[in-house]
């Protein structure tokens, strides 16, 4: 999701120049620019008593409304501390934090927290309450009517993919994945505009994690919450984040931008190292076939003369030709088999075994390319009409 | 008086402890009156209830608050150690002169105070550890969702600590019921009086009846609190998660791999 707003320092680290207490102009002027920040941190510092250096040191960050911002960084870099300062589970030593344009310290803690969903790694379901009662926690605190709560609970169960039969169970009867779904439903119960998630999926196994991540992405497309997601898993951040903030020890913001921006141009060595190997592949997972100019490929109609096919093959420098009937793709023919045929359509043909669609990632297209005999990925639209084809060269161009 | 030989051979060798006990227990006259079994039983139950309630009032609230702060481990350990070190009779003996001094006299109050002192340590320790050891994630979630501190204590920490809290009360109560017997030594009429008098009067039936009823009362107390615990913690009896994945779990093998 691209949004029109500028988020403080999307083009470089904000507050990373720790030597100067001054923060970039975008961050100091709360109403400047078209930015519609739902959460704004300005020069936020947290120094725990007895610690030699601050856990978070003058961090400035703006989280766009309706966006999922991932805070990612190595263990102990201050991600959780930053998150907990937003809902005041931890009070900053200095600096200001605004949520929805209001300074958090101007509101009673418990009232602030009732407007902010909170999901943690340990999930923290109440063992002594049924799933339904767990989900109803904040609505009860807010004094909703019973019937409203019941309807809301059922609705949420559907949204997070939870079997309604489970609502009357106690949490101990649920699997880890189901418990995490309840945790998300509970956080969303009173429909808060903001959701804070602290490593929500690091306690579940990888397969369940992937499902939960997909569910969150789907849910976010529906709900457009302002989400701050803390994770140490850069792949999770790339997969889920509209923007990712890479933090170094002491809460230093090394880079802040969309996953594509960060992967294309890591700001420094720390970011590059943290993004890890296969940066190109990770970028490819973010780009769809629709965003890449397609090649026409060595294509001829079935009723064309072999000479036309020879020309097409020569033009593309390949020894095979794709055979079309209108815009229906019939398959491909080997150049050597064309000799005796009156029309290209008479030569023996092999069907293409795999296709990609405009919505497919180019990473998947690459997989297609390397696995096909013809070294191309054939692109069909949703009605199976031929759109074009991709080669490795096309993909490399798209990444430039 | 000599007993005819056939009769001797037919039954117990002599009236016997068992039959002495049984006849004392089942003689209606022994149950009635100011110092009858019924009155003693009621007094025994009364002092036990009062002592347990007082001890709970004194022990549980501070223990819960201390557990909530997750501090004061040293105090908790000290309380339980003092409780272990002091034998009940010593407590009664220690309380007696103070009670006389304060004009509370013999009987009920010195016994009751001693029982309270006896009952506090298990209740305090269990309530303290119970609350302190509630899963930190659960507490963090409660606070993070906007529960006030009072609500966190009453709606989350105490319910989750309740199995331990109730166990503490149970242990204390059983101990109190057993120890209240000693009240008879300082002039409190209770089931212990049957034992003391039975001993002095060499009335084995009376003595055994006292001992028997104290034992029964202890068991009933134990059973009562076990039941309370069961009813108060339905989630601990709920079906646990089975080993195989439940229905709404994603398949164990990714199909699109
Ligand atoms: N309550 C606390 N008291 C003292 N130090 C803390 C506390 N919480 C976190 N820290 C320290 O602050 C630093 C950042 O911690 P945290 O925000 O939890 O890191 P992350 O979530 O990125 O792993 C760590 O060095 C940690 O030891
Ligand atoms: Mg953390």
Image (tube, rainbow, N blue to C red):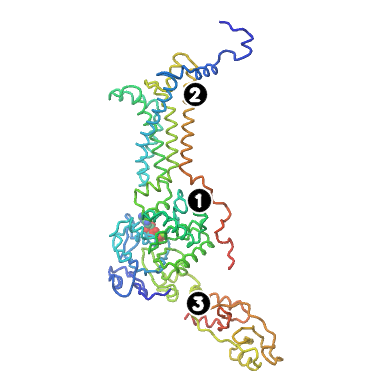
Q: Which residue is mark 2?
A: B212
Q: Is mark 2 within 8 Å of ligand 1?
A: no
SS at mark 3 in the image: loop
* Dot 2 alpha-carbon crowd within 10 angstroms: few under 14, some 14 to 19, many 20 or more: some
Subunit ID for the residue under disc 1: A
Residue at which label 1 appears: A172
Mark 3 vs mark 1: in front? 1
Q: Which residue is mark 3?
A: A288
Q: Residue furthest top?
A: B1
In the picture, which quadrant includes the N terminus of chain B? top right
Same chain for the residues at labels 2 and 1, yes or no? Answer: no
3 and 2 marks in contact (CB < 8 Å): no
Alpha carbon distance from label 3 to label 2: 84 Å
Indicate left or right for B95 with A120 as reference: left
Mark 2, chain letter?
A: B
* Relative image position of residue A106 (x, y in whole percent): 28, 60
Vertical comparison of B101 with A38: above or below:
above
Determine whether the residue tagged by mark 1 lies in a helix, strand or loop.
helix
Q: Nearer the viewer, mark 3 or mark 2?
A: 2
Q: Is residue A281 above or below residue A106?
A: below
Circle 2 SS class: helix
Please rate how many residues cluster around mark 3, counting C-alpha atoms within 10 Å: few if below 14, some from 14 to 19, many from 20: some
Q: Position of residue A105 (x, y in %)?
A: 29, 59
| Mark 3 and mark 1 on one chain | yes
């Amino acid at each position: 999701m691209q949004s029109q707003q500028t988020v403080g320092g999307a083009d470089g680290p904000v507050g990373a120049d720790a030597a100067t207490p001054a923060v970039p102009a975008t961050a100091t002027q709360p109403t400047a620019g078209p930015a519609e920040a739902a959460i704004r941190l300005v020069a936020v510092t947290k120094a725990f008593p007895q610690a030699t250096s601050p856990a978070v040191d003058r961090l400035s960050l703006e989280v766009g409304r309706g966006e999922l911002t991932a805070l990612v960084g190595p263990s102990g870099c201050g991600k959780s501390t930053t998150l907990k300062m937003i809902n005041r589970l931890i009070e900053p030593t200095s600096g200001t934090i605004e949520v929805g344009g209001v300074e958090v310290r101007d509101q009673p803690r418990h009232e602030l927290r009732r407007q902010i969903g909170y999901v943690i790694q340990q999930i923290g379901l109440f063992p002594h309450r049924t799933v339904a009662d767990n989900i109803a926690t904040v609505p009860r605190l807010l004094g909703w009517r019973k019937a409203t709560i019941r309807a809301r609970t059922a609705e949420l169960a559907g949204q997070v993919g939870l079997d309604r039969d489970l609502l009357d169970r106690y949490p101990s009867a649920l699997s880890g994945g189901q418990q995490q779904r309840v945790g998300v439903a509970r956080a969303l119960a009173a429909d808060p505009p903001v959701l804070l998630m602290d490593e929500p999926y690091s306690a579940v196994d990888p397969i369940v994690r992937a499902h939960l991540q997909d569910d969150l992405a789907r849910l976010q497309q529906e709900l457009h919450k302002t989400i701050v997601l803390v994770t140490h898993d850069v792949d999770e951040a790339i997969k889920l984040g509209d923007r990712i903030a890479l933090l170094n020890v002491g809460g230093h913001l090394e880079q802040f931008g969309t996953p594509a921006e960060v992967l294309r141009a890591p700001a420094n060595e720390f970011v590059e190292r943290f993004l890890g190997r296969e940066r190109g592949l990770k970028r490819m997972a973010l780009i769809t076939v629709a965003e890449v100019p397609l090649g026409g490929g060595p294509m001829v109609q079935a009723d064309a003369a072999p000479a036309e096919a020879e020309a097409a093959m020569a033009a593309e420098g390949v020894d095979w030709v794709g055979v079309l009937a209108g815009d229906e793709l019939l398959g491909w023919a080997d150049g050597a088999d064309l000799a005796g045929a009156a029309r290209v359509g008479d030569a023996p043909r092999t069907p293409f075994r795999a296709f990609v669609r405009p919505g497919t990632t180019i990473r998947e297209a690459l997989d297609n390319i390397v696995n096909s005999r013809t070294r191309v990925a054939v692109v069909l639209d949703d009605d199976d009409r031929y759109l074009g084809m991709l080669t490795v060269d096309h993909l490399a161009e798209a990444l430039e | 008086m000599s007993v005819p030989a056939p009769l001797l051979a037919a039954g117990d060798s002599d009236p016997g402890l068992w039959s002495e006990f049984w006849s004392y227990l089942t003689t209606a006259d022994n149950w009635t009156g100011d110092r009858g079994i019924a009155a003693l039983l009621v007094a025994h139950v009364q002092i036990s209830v009062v002592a347990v309630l007082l001890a709970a009032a004194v022990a549980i609230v501070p223990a819960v608050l201390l557990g909530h702060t997750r501090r004061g481990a040293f105090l908790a350990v000290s309380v339980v150690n003092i409780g272990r070190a002091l034998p009940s009779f010593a407590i009664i003996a220690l309380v007696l002169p103070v009670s006389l001094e304060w004009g509370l006299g013999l009987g009920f109050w010195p016994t009751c105070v001693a029982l309270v002192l006896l009952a506090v340590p298990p209740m305090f320790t269990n309530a303290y550890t119970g609350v302190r050891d509630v899963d930190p994630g659960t507490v963090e979630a409660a606070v993070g969702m906007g529960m006030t501190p009072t609500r966190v204590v009453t709606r989350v920490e105490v319910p989750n600590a309740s199995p331990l809290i109730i166990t503490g009360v149970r242990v204390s109560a059983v101990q109190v019921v057993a120890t209240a017997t000693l009240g008879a030594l300082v002039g409190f009429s209770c089931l212990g009086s049957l034992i003391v008098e039975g001993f002095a009067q060499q009335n084995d039936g009376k003595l055994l009846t006292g001992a028997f009823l104290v034992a029964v009362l202890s068991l009933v107390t134990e059973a009562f609190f076990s039941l309370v615990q069961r009813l108060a913690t339905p989630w601990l009896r709920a079906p646990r998660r089975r080993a195989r994945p439940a229905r709404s779990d994603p398949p164990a093998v990714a199909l699109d791999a």
